Image (cartoon, rainbow, N blue to C red):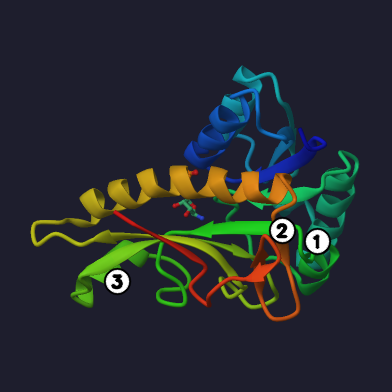
């Protein structure tokens, strides 16, 4: 088995993606190990999930800092104390400074609830419905300085049904997130996934611009 890959997860909310990661790293044969979960919100339910799983947690209040750079510098210090090989954003509701992103270049992943490059930012399900899209989904990508813009690793595509509401769509997309995020983290932990100059590489081969596609 490959060496252990320590992962730090950053979140601000419910943490259902964290839960999927916890469950997937508990299977016994995954080299990924969640070393810590850090939140900028003390009441994030994700912190409780981590505590329940016996994982170290930290809270860092962004409101206690003057400006993004100062908060991000403190975050870097906190994260690096755990010496992670990978940092995973799982609903971390902060825009990251360029310095933070550069510091973790090639070892920072994010999940976004749309088929990027469509619908960067918020309200993605509503926007997909309003546009009359027949397909929607979620994306895991390496983080770069462009918001929701880094090289794609994997996308899950689902059909939009005529009767779909924002809630029903969100729920089905969320279920797909819980499949593709653990998959991408596992690839990284196994040393199969990396960030090259031209984009994301899986097993040494450049992935398509859309990343690895999964259709349901
Ligand atoms: C997910 O929809 C993810 O795509 C986005 O934030 C949400 C986090 O959900 N980045 P949860 O807290 O993991 O349930």
Looking at this view, name the residue that lies furthest to the left. Answer: 163
In front: label 3 or label 2: 2
Counting residues from the N terminus, which is met first, the one under dot 3 or under dot 2?
2
Q: Nearer the viewer, residue 181 or 46?
A: 181
SS category of the residue bearing label 2: strand
Q: Is mark 1 within 8 Å of ligand 1?
A: no
User: Label 2, on which residue?
Assistant: 108
Indicate the quadrant containing the N terminus: top left, top right, bottom left or bottom right: top right
Q: Residue 135, percent across and down?
A: 26, 67
Q: Residues within 10 Å of mark 3 (few under 14, many from 20)?
A: some
Residue 2: image x %, image y %?
78, 37
Q: How many marks?
A: 3
**Residue 44 appears in the picture as rendered:** no
Q: Is residue 125 visible?
A: yes
**C-alpha span from label 2 to label 1:** 6 Å
Q: Which mark is residue 156?
A: none
Q: Say which of 96 and 206 sits in front.
A: 206
Q: Would residue 72 be found to the left or right of residue 26 on screen?
A: right
Location of mark 3 (residue): 127
Residue named by callout 1: 104
Circle 1 residues within 10 Å: few <14, some 14–19, many ≥20: some
């Amino acid at each position: 088995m490959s060496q252990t890959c320590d992962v730090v997860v950053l979140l601000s909310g419910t943490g259902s993606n964290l839960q999927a990661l916890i469950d997937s790293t508990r299977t016994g044969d995954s080299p990924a190990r969640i070393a810590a979960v850090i939140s900028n919100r003390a009441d994030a339910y994700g912190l409780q999930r981590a505590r329940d799983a016996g994982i170290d947690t930290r809270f860092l209040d962004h409101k206690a800092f003057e400006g993004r750079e100062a908060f991000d510098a403190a975050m870097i210090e906190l994260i690096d104390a755990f010496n992670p090989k990978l940092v995973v954003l799982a609903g971390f509701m902060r825009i990251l400074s360029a310095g933070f992103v550069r510091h973790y270049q090639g070892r920072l992943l994010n999940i976004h609830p749309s088929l990027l490059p469509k619908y960067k930012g918020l309200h993605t399900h509503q926007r997909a419905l309003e546009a009359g899209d027949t397909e929607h989904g979620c994306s895991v990508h390496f983080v770069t300085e462009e918001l929701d813009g880094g090289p794609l690793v994997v996308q899950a595509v689902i059909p939009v049904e005529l009767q779909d509401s924002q809630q029903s769509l969100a729920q089905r997309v969320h279920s797909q997130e819980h499949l593709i995020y653990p998959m991408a983290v596992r690839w990284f932990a196994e040393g199969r996934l990396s960030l090259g100059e031209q984009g994301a590489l899986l097993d040494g081969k450049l992935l398509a611009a859309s990343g690895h596609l999964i259709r349901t």
